[in-house]
Image (tube, rainbow, N blue to C red):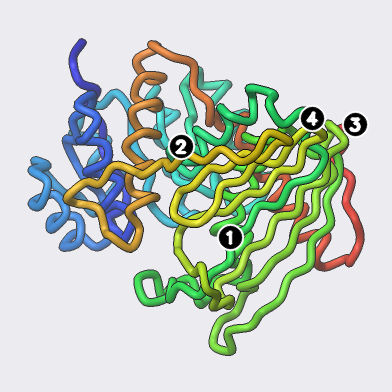
Amino acid sequence: MQPLRFAMFGAGFWANYQLPGWLETGMVECVAICDPNRDKAAALAQRWGVPIAYNSAEDLFAHETLDFVDICAPVEVHVPLTKMAADRGLHMVCQKPLAPSLEAAAELVAYCEQKGVMLLVNENWRWQDPIRRLKAQLETGSIGTPFRARIDYRNSFPIFDNQPFLKTLKQFIIADMGTHILDVTRYLFGEAASLYCHTQTIHKDIVGEDVATVMLKMVSGATVVVEMSYSSPREHDRFPEVYVEIEGDQGFLELAPDFWIRETSPQGTLAQRSVPVHYDWANPEYDLVHTSIVTCQTHLAKALMALDPAETTGLDNLKTLQLVYKAYESSVSGQSIGLGIS
C-alpha cells in the first residue's frame, strides 16, 4: 500500500514532534508544511526533508495532491482549515481541542459528515503505553466492579517556558490538559452522567485557571475525581505522568509514579512496570507524551487507510468536549451539571 500523502498546517512547538511522529509510522509522506510564518514552516520542512513550505492555505491546496491534512495549528483556525479541507474532499486529523466551543465542534463534525470525509482527532494521551496497559488490566475484571477512582495530574512543570502563549488563554488547564485527561477518564470508565468542577488561578501572571478539580458521577455509578494542576510542587513531581487509583469491590488497581502498575487483592500486591519507548527526536521532558504520538498516529494512519476503525473520531471527541465545556459551566455556576446521560 502506498504511503498516504499529507500536508501539515502549523509549525509551532508541537509540530516539531507531531511531524516526526508521523514519519516514524512509515505509513505516510509529508509533502508540504503551511504556517503564516513561512520561515518557521521552511525551517521545519528543511529539518525533516519536506519538499515545500507555504504561508497560505489556499496556495497549498491549489498546488498539492493530498490524501489528508494534519491540522496542528491554534484552535482558532481549526474550523476554517477543516472546512477548507472538507470542501476539497480531504480527510483530516485535527489537534485538540477540536473547536473553541462545543457548538462549533458539533457543527464541524456535522459539516464533515455531510461532505463525506473523515474527521479524526489527534488525541494521543489515551495511547500512552502505561494507560493502555492499565485499561487492559482493568478489563480483566480482577478487581471486580470499580466504584471510585482518582486521576491525578498535578505537578509544577514550567509549562509556560515552551508555550508562553498559554499564559494568555482565558480557559487554560481544562481546555489544554483537561481535554486529554477527561478523554482518558472516558477511555477508562465510560460516560459520565453529571459533573461538578471548581477552578483556581495560582500563578499570578496568567489569565486562565491553572488548577481544576472535577468530580464526575459515571453512568456506571462510579465516582471519578480528576485533579489537574501546574502549581503543585510535590515529591513525585514527574511531568507529564498521570497517576490513577481505582477502587473495585474486589481489589485496588493503580498507575503509580515511574510507570508502575500495581494491583492489590486479598492475595497480595502484584506489580509490573511499563516503560515507554524513547525516540531520538523526542524531548526528554515530554518523552512519555512524544512516544504516545507515534502509537496514536499509527492507529490514525490505519484508520485513514480503512484498515482499522478509529477510536478518536470527531463524533467521539464531542463527548470529551462536552465534559470540558460543561466543567467550565459548572465552575462559573458553582452547580453540578447534568450531561443528559443516565
Residue of label 4: 145
Q: Secondary structure at mark 2?
A: helix
Q: Residue furthest bottom?
A: 204
- Residue 76: tell me if it is visible: no
- Up the image or down, 251 lies above or below 150; here it is above
Residue of label 1: 153
Which numbered circle lies on residue 342?
3
Rate crowding at label 4 as few (under 14), some (14 to 19) or many (20 or more) other CA atoms within 10 Å. Answer: some
Q: Please name whichever residue, 171 or 65, is drawn nearer the observer in this view of the structure.
A: 171
Which badge, 4 or 1, comes first in the chain's sequence? 4
Tell me what residue is drawn at x 34 percent, y 15 percent: 305
Q: Which corner quadrant of the image does residue 145 belong to? A: top right
Tell me what residue is drawn at x 71 percent, y 76 percent: 200
| Labels 4, 3: front one | 4
Which badge, 1 or 2, comes first in the chain's sequence? 2
CA distance for labels 4 and 1: 24 Å
Residue of label 2: 127
Which badge, 4 or 3, comes first in the chain's sequence? 4
